[in-house]
Amino acid sequence: GAVVSQHPSWVICKSGTSVKIECRSLDFQATTMFWYRQFPKQSLMLMATSNEGSKATYEQGVEKDKFLINHASLTLSTLTVTSAHPEDSSFYICSARDQGYSSYNEQFFGPGTRLTVL
Amino acid sequence: AQSVTQPDIHITVSEGASLELRCNYSYGATPYLFWYVQSPGQGLQLLLKYFSGDTLVQGIKGFEAEFKRSQSSFNLRKPSVHWSDAAEYFCAVGATVSGGYNKLIFGAGTRLAVHP
């Protein structure tokens, strides 16, 4: 149980284009999903927290107009990188929290999406 | 402010040797503490967690961690390391922030290499 998937697992795009990454909870309902960014050999940095049916909460320094997050259902959240540039190249990881799970803070992580912007 | 420190960026051990990865946290209330492992190009897998109760926590793959409130530490241990344990290890604290929602704060990670 508690499986989170991401699609695509990797994507290469041209500078100036937009890319959408999907995060799905496969066997549970997630009221809250999180989006992280990880640079090579570095830790995970939280970008934003999305709650189903409401606007995402962005961390300080994260451009909300550039990183659009939509959490339209209890099993799906999407991250759209708009007008991508080479500096947006990174490993993006999502996680989800099971609304029915007793462990208040536990998050289940997806396998990540490698974005390369040329 | 909440924070997590993993003092060791890189550790190398021989297969079969014991392992201890250090983690110190800064958090005002009773912390929720986690250890995750990440293989190259992969997401994170939860090894173990501490919420309350027994301060020695058993996890998967033979790992354990001990919560020491007096030292603000949550060190990860394994008595005998296997070559497949080579990976990146992250300690994290669950924090409740303004607005009532909660998030994970990660340490910088410790990269473990295992020599045959």
Image: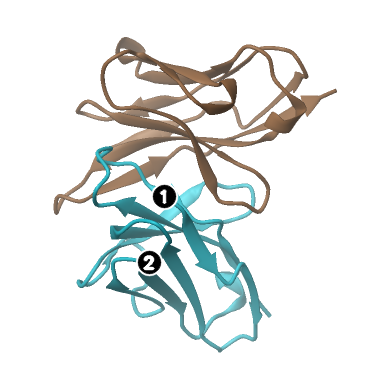
**Residue type indicated by callout 2:** Val
Is B24 situated above or below A77?
A: above
| Front residue of B42 and A18 | B42
Q: Mark 1 packing: few (<14 Cα in 10 Å), some, or many (20+)?
A: some
Residue, disc 2: A62
- Number of labelled discs? 2
Q: Chain of mark 1?
A: A
Residue where numbered disc 1 is placed = A2
Snapshot colouring: by chain
Looking at the rendered image, the quarter that the C terminus of chain B falls into is: top right
**Chain A takes which shade in the image?**
cyan
* Residue A33 coordinates in the image, percent (x, y): 34, 59
**Furthest residue toward bottom:** A16
Does residue B16 appear to the left or right of A86 in the view shown? right
Badge 2 density bin: few <14, some 14–19, many ≥20, Cα 10 Å: few
Q: Position of residue B19 (x, y in %)?
A: 63, 16
Disc sitting over residue B36 in the figure: none
Report the front residue among A39 and B91. Answer: B91
Considering only vertical position in the picture, is A108 above or below A33? above
Chain painted in brown in the figure: B
Percent coordinates x, y for residue B71 in the rendering: 36, 13
Q: Percent from the top left, x then y, of residue B86?
A: 71, 33
Which is more N-terminal, label 1 or label 2?
1
| Element at label 1 | loop
Image point (58%, 56%), residue name: A39
Type of the residue with mark 1? Ala
Q: Secondary structure at mark 2?
A: loop
Instruction: Check the image and report above or below for B25 versus A33.
Output: above
Determine the chain carrying the residue at label 2.
A
